[in-house]
């Protein structure tokens, strides 16, 4: 093994690039070798490699199968903003967690929290 103590920074960087390329080359060769072995095993078992890896067609068949509700994760929705900064309507707060500075400032100046509430129009369902 060569002594790297006497190498310049440029030489070290060049050596590092060569090492990285060699690592990638060997990893690619190992991957190709293993892939060939897996293909041989699959063929010997009467399967295609795509059967083992799950092709899009296979995934579609699996997706079509009924799913129990216990297996489905609940959808987490972002809470709706409840308060809005009158000076900058883009700043909103859900009313959860720590109060934003603009809410603190409004309350410190004697303002009521209800003033900051976002007024929503209620839609009535027509029968």
Image (cartoon, rainbow, N blue to C red):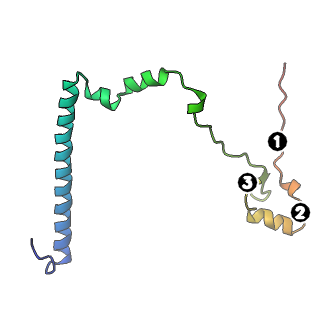
Residue occupying the point 21% across, 69% down = 13
- In the rendered image of this protein, does residue 36 appear above or below residue 92? above
Residues marked 2 and 1 touching at CB (< 8 Å): no
Q: Position of residue 102 (x, y in %)?
A: 77, 64
Mark closest to the chain's N terminus, 2 or 1: 2
* Farthest-out residue, left: 1
CA gap between label 2 and label 3 equals 17 Å
Q: Position of residue 103 (x, y in %)?
A: 79, 62
Task: Identify residue for label 1.
Answer: 120
* Farthest-out residue, bottom: 6
Count of numbered marks: 3
Mark closest to the chain's N terminus, 3 or 1: 3
**Kind of element beneath mark 1:** loop
Residue 92: image tag: 3
Task: Identify residue for label 2.
Answer: 111
Horizontally, residue 110 falls left or right of residue 64, namely right
Horizontally, residue 35 falls left or right of residue 2, namely right
Residue occupying the point 32% across, 32% down = 53
């Amino acid at each position: 093994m060569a002594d790297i103590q006497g190498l310049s920074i440029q030489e070290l960087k060049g050596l590092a690039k060569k090492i990285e390329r060699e690592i990638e080359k060997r990893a690619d060769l190992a991957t190709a070798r293993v892939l060939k072995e897996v293909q041989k095993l699959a063929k010997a078992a009467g399967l295609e490699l795509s059967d083992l890896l799950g092709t899009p067609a296979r995934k579609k068949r699996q997706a079509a199968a009924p799913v129990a509700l216990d297996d489905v994760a609940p959808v987490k929705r972002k809470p709706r903003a409840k308060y809005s900064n009158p000076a900058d309507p883009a700043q909103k707060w859900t009313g959860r967690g720590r109060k934003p500075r603009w809410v603190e400032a409004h309350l410190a100046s004697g303002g009521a929290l209800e003033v900051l509430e976002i007024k929503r129009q209620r839609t009535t369902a027509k029968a």
